[in-house]
Image (cartoon, helix red, strand yellow):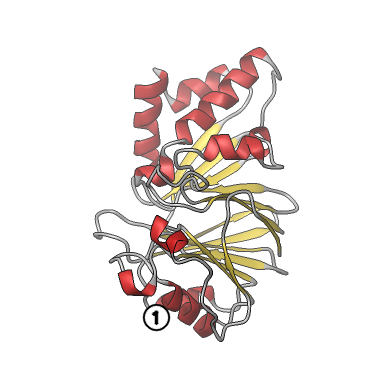
Amino acid sequence: MRLHVIGSGSCLFRQEDRCPASYILETEHHNILIDTGAGTVDNIVKSEVSLGEIGCIINTHRHPDHVSDLIPIIQNRVVENVYYSGSEKNIDIYGPEGHESYVEGRVAEEMDSSLELLNEEFSFDVEVADVRESFKLVGLEIELREVEHGSDEFPCLAVRVDSGEKSVVFTGDTDYFEELADFSEGADLLVADCSMPDDKKAEGHMTPSECVRLAEKADTDKLLLSHLYPDMDEEGELREFDFEDVIKAEDLMKIEI
């Protein structure tokens, strides 16, 4: 497995070197895109993975900094199909409850079409599914669980991808809670929402100390701090923790797993 950090930042556009948190997990059979906030498409173009190689998208929740570029990705696939390739990969899109109707509504408003029409007209299919617990892709087990970020009516998901040999956990946007350590147990890489420094704790997000506590309880090998607000950059270098392998994410960073 290889992780490409497409975006490591927050919803604030004044972060010149960071677009909203987004990742591509490159596996033997799949390139999985986790979240699609504003700037995702621009940074994918700068990465080593092409848009056409992405066949699976998982949106952890529907705040704009996690979904804004979703329809542009579909539109790009359509235009590539019509004018250039004639053949494109299918796109399977997964998200929390209500995601299928949300994507269908955006396709109608932004593309004057529907998922059914797109699938009839072009040589690739766009399939959308609401997911809550787990599903399988070729060679992979994908586990999901709801996390603590906002109300129960606005679910946000953590994502665990397991190949049988390696595993990666994405916390999504969340506050610290004990059960998240059980979900993350033994992961080779934990990608954690680390929005604010310890002295500026924000509800619904974690701080560096909380991320480290989660990694220690889960006995993970490596911790990647991401979804960083400007305050995290103003802090300068991370202070030292007892947990050995802590990395502060940067856009377009690559991590071998």
The picture quadrant where one finds residue 123 is: top right
- Amino acid identity at mark 1: Glu
| Front-most of residues 100 and 155 | 155
- Tell me residue 245's x, y (percent): 63, 76
Q: Give the quarter of the figure containing the C terminus.
A: bottom right
| Front-most of residues 16 and 29 | 16
Q: Name the residue at 52% across, 72% down.
A: 238
**Residue 244 can be seen in this image:** yes
Report which residue position mark 1 lands on. 178
Q: Residue furthest top?
A: 83
The picture quadrant where one finds residue 180 is: bottom left
| Front-most of residues 137 and 6 | 6
Residue 124 falls left or right of residue 196: right
Q: Sort mark 1 into few (<14), some (14-19) or many (20+) by Cα contacts within 10 Å.
A: few
Number of numbered tags placed on the structure image: 1
Q: What secondary structure is marked by label 1?
A: loop
Residue 135 falls left or right of residue 210: right
- Tell me residue 106's x, y (percent): 37, 30
Q: Residue furthest right?
A: 28
- Tell me residue 84's x, y (percent): 69, 16
Relative to 168, is 58 above or below?
A: above
Q: Give the quarter of the figure containing the N terminus.
A: bottom right
Relative to 256, is 176 above or below?
A: below
